[in-house]
Amino acid sequence: MKRLILVIIAVSAMSFMWASPGLAVENYGSAGCGLGSLIFGDQPGGIQVIAATTNASTYSQLFGITSGTSNCDKQPKSYSHTRLNEFVVANMDNLAKDIAMGQGESLETVAELMGISAEEKPMMFAKLQKNFLNIFTSEKVEAAEVIDNITTLMNNG
Amino acid sequence: MKRSISLCISLVIYFSLTALSEANPDLHEFIQKAEEKRLYEDRQWQILLHYKPVRSGYTSLIDDPDFFLSPVGKEDPKAELEATLRAFFESDRSGDGHPRCRFVARFEWLKEKLGMDASLFPDVACNEWENILRTVQPRSAVLVFPAAFMNNPASMFGHTLLRIDGSYESKLLSFAANYAADPGTMGILYPIKGIFGFYKGYFNLFPYYDRIKMYNDTEQRDMWEYKLNLTEDEVRRMFLHLWELKGIYSYYYFFDENCSYNLMFLLEAARPSIHLTDKFGAWVVPVDTIRTVEESGIVEGIEFRPAKATRIRYISSLLDDKNKKKALSIAEKRLNPSELSDIPKEDKVKMLDLATEIIQYKYFKGTLSKDEYQTLFLAALKERSQLGNSDDTYKIPVPTPPEKGHLSNRLGLGIGIMDGRLFQDISIRPAYHSLIDPDDGYLEGSQIVFANTRIRYITDGRIRLERFDFIDIASVTPRDRFFKPLSFKIKTGFMQQMNPYRDENLIYYFEPGIGVAFGNKHMGVYFIMAEASLDISGDYSDNYALGGGLWVGMTKKITDFWKINLSAETLPHMLGEEFQENRASAVQTFRLNQNNSLNLSISWEEIFHDNRTELELNWNYYF
């Protein structure tokens, strides 16, 4: 009986799946060291793309990597803390947004990774916001630079 | 072939290990102790090996032979336990491949249960394991539900994943455990393979910020985070088991052994006293797993993480029309962000915040190239940064959480009049939600119906199958300034329909449609779809009728508990049997409570120049 119900539902679902307007396949890996890193590799609009992959052991088996930096290995001069670098490479856009707004989850995360205390945070956020252009110096700015620029600002009292 | 070779190798290893035990008195003692205590029948052992009772004993739901140390481990808990103990005493190798580095949960549990001293086990350098333990630092866990997404069949019911929080305060640095199938080369057989277990499913562990980017930002899905009251020890135990499952496949079945079901094993590994995996039957719907988890008492709080699309809509609602347009112009490169003079600061802040979100969204969608995006994004942010601080912590209103929506099965009892005759209906629907059910907790405008069955008793003595819909799926999503989704529908099944002989009989129908909708909560949502219709019936010329037409409708919530749905359809059939089909209906939905609703409907149809009206009151009970 259970089989029969399952077959009935299966026939139903199959007809829907074939007719579905879009199918998504996960593609893991960010694109470079600058703004615009996505999880879908170099292809924005990933939802509408059916990315065929013949490698069966691709992304579905990834385990515990902290680094989406498959194609970014530039390290900041001021920090040898890989977690910080990995985070900024993968979240640079949201970090930029948070710095411009003077608050936000990504900014809080970077502050935590840099060891900034709770008391120091408001001052840090205000300072970074005021100096936005000294952190994101150009459209092609990269994560390592951003980290170094933040460090410089924090060190300059 | 591959399987026989691996079986062969397992047997060789097994027998050599057996020989080994004879040479190791400790091992022998522990095997005996384990047998005396019948540890292979212990709940924890069953959980760790994913054993389920079957007629002939037990079978594990894991399919990968690499998960078992005994060649008969999949079906024999006792043999597996013994083989596991032998494997732990292996001394001829070390490193991450050693069983003590792989089966860390089994090892910890057996060590405790059998009182095995740590000194018996020389260090085998489990570098990979120690590294990940150090990186993740499991402390607490959160069950996360990315809401349903209608544009992808695998996501229609939502999804669940388990976030493992470490010692960082920021949740972005947490990791998310997830079970997913690996479809390899996608093809036309994707749905069949997904349903019937032709894909291998694996557990994986991604940075949480990455999952947020995927679900929240790219796929526009709100995320619900259910904080669990598991202790640090319990979460650690769960993580140990997750490690054991790394790289291990089991066949993925879309209906029952899917993403949500498999996560339940992890929760049971944390706290064996809760029963989750045996609470489900032929199909497992993600939101039902949340309900079951809640019932087990381990949920202590819930947080809402709105999608980028939700944020865009909210910020936009705080601006007047003129400013909304300007914000959009910035994102469309028709207005420079620096040209927002004469606008009060608070509005400017919101406009720039909105423009920034839209710019990011357009980039995800591929509307902007990377270069365009980088330029636009920075220009908007530069302006925003110069405005300084503002009270722009947007407090986005939290909708009804998904587990508070009506339950997935529906039983309907109806009474009505058709053609002047009284009738009574009984209907049953195992899944899931329709446009005339109360929306609370569900994606508005979505309809997912499987195996809807309706039986009618007419007071002239007839009992008949009124309809059986295999599937009836629809998505009616209004387009607005920012988002331009398509609306669609697809339905197929059997239904009673008038035939050329002024009588009704069961026909088979198939009706796909595509269109657009517009409007919002306040004015109502209006849609129009073009549809095709194929009817199959022995009473038709050449047994079929093919046609195409139009379907229009609207839906509006009048109060918290009262919703109205209107629809009208015209469907001329032009090939096979030729006839005109027109329909119209008005349905009022009253939500009595979470699991009870009423539908009052009046419908009219005209087929083969014969028309009739039907009035019905239905009571729906969800369970």
Image (cartoon, helix red, strand yellow):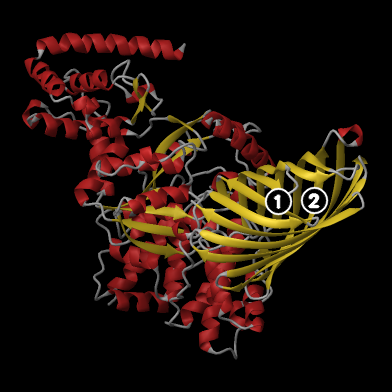
Residue wearing tag 1:
B489
Marked residue chain, label 1 = B
CB under 8 Å between discs 1 and 2:
yes
Helix, strand or loop at mark 1:
strand
Tell me which amino acid carries mark 2: Glu
**Subunit bearing disc 2:** B
Depth check: give the residue in front, B123 or B8: B8
Compared with B34, A12 (above or below) is below
Q: Position of residue B523 (x, y in %)?
A: 67, 75
Q: Where is residue B237 shown, x and y percent of the image? A: 23, 42
Q: Secondary structure at mark 2?
A: strand
Amino acid type, callout 1: Lys
The answer for how far apart the CA atoms under marks 1 and 2 are is 8 Å
* Crowding near the residue tagged with mark 2, few <14, some 14–19, many ≥20 C-alpha atoms within 10 Å: many
**Residue drawn at the location 43% of the way across and 76% of the way down:** B393
Instruction: Report whether residue B130 is seen.
Output: yes
Density class for disc 1 (Cα within 10 Å; few <14, some 14-19, many ≥20) is many
Residue B187 got which mark?
A: none
Q: Nearer the viewer, residue A118 or B435?
A: B435
Name the residue that disc number 2 marks.
B531
User: Visible in this render: residue A74?
Assistant: no
- Percent of width and height locating residue A155: 28, 72
Q: Is residue B470 above or below residue B528?
A: above
Which residue is farthest front?
B460
